Structures are given as C-alpha cells and as structure tokens.
Amino acid sequence: MSLLRSLRIFGTDVLQICRAYGAGFTDDRSANPAAAGRGVTAARITTLTAAIAAFGKVMNTPRGQIVNKSALLREVETDTAALVQLATDTDDLALQFDGTDAGKRFIEAWKRARNIVDTGGGHSGTPPTPPTPPATPKP
C-alpha cells in the first residue's frame, strides 16, 4: 500500500502519530547528543511541526469539495425542474387566449418562441477529419 493511500485511509491516525512524535521533539540536544549528527536541528523540528499543522488543516479539504459539488449539483437539478415547471405553467396560461384571432396569433408566436432551433454552432457528433500529411519524396 502506498504512503499516499495510507494517508488517505488512515489520515487521522497518521496525523495523531505525527503530532505525538512532534510533541516529543525538543530543541534540547543534550537529551540525545547524536541527534545533531542525524540532521535533527531546531529549524527542521520547526519545519516538521509546521508541516504537521498544515496537513491537519487541509486533510479533509478534498472530501469537503466533493460534498460541496454534490450539493450544488442537486441544487441545479432542483432549479432546472422548477424552471421546466414554470414554462409548462406558462404554456397552460397561453391557452386562455384561444378565443380570439389575436389570441390564436399569440399562441402560435408563443409556440414558435418555445421551439429549440439548432443553429449548428455546437460540437458535432463526428470529429473533424485530420488533414492528410504531405507525401514524402522517394529518393
């Protein structure tokens, strides 16, 4: 199992372990005289402590973004359904003008305005054919 996958699965446990190790670090090298020989310095301890704190703050960010996206998609679906319902209700209201010649013209204009016309400006289903490469001369 990769380290990154372990952090994702056991993020909280890894963070707690790092904090425990970080709490054990001190700037007092007399507690372990060989620490300086292994590269443990006050600056590295400070950097490690800052990295542990930063990791704790961003650990749940991806999960929060997924939840946020899901909520926004549900909101868009709900708003789209409401918009379709409003258009249907307006179609029903237009029928009340059916009694006169002007009302019939209004209804026909309303139906024409509601038609979706494909002007061909979007992407087509078939990809464009690539240009043929120039022929290489034979020696």
Image: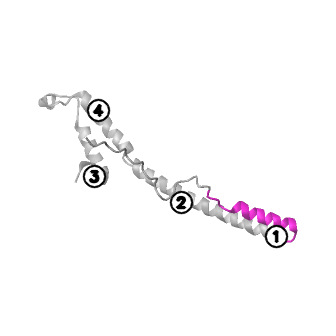
Distance in Å between CA atoms under marks 1 and 2: 35 Å
Task: Give the camera-side residue of 82 and 104.
Answer: 104
Q: Quadrant of the N terminus?
A: bottom left
Distance in Å between CA atoms under marks 4 and 2: 42 Å
Look at mark 2 in the image and give the residue it sits on: 74
Closer to viewer: mark 4 or mark 2? 2
Q: Secondary structure at mark 2?
A: helix
Rendering colour mode: one colour
Distance in Å between CA atoms under marks 3 and 2: 29 Å
Label 4 neighbour load within 10 Å: few <14, some 14-19, many 20+: few
Look at mark 4 in the image and give the residue it sits on: 47
Closer to viewer: mark 1 or mark 3? 1
Say which label, 4 or 2, has the lower sequence index.
4
On residue 50, which mark appears? none
Task: Give the camera-side residue of 117 and 8.
Answer: 117
Give the amino acid type for the residue marked by disc 2 in the picture: Arg
Residue 80 location, x and y as percent?
Answer: 60, 60
Look at mark 3 in the image and give the residue it sits on: 5
Q: Residue at x 49, y 59 (%)?
A: 125
Circles 3, 4 touching at the beta carbon (< 8 Å): no
Say which label, 1 or 3, has the lower sequence index.
3
Say which label, 4 or 1, has the lower sequence index.
4
Label 2 neighbour load within 10 Å: few <14, some 14-19, many 20+: few
Give the amino acid type for the residue marked by disc 3 in the picture: Arg
Q: Residue at x 69, y 63 (%)?
A: 87
Going by the image, does 54 lie left or right of 71?
left
Distance in Å between CA atoms under marks 1 and 3: 63 Å
Label 1 neighbour load within 10 Å: few <14, some 14-19, many 20+: few
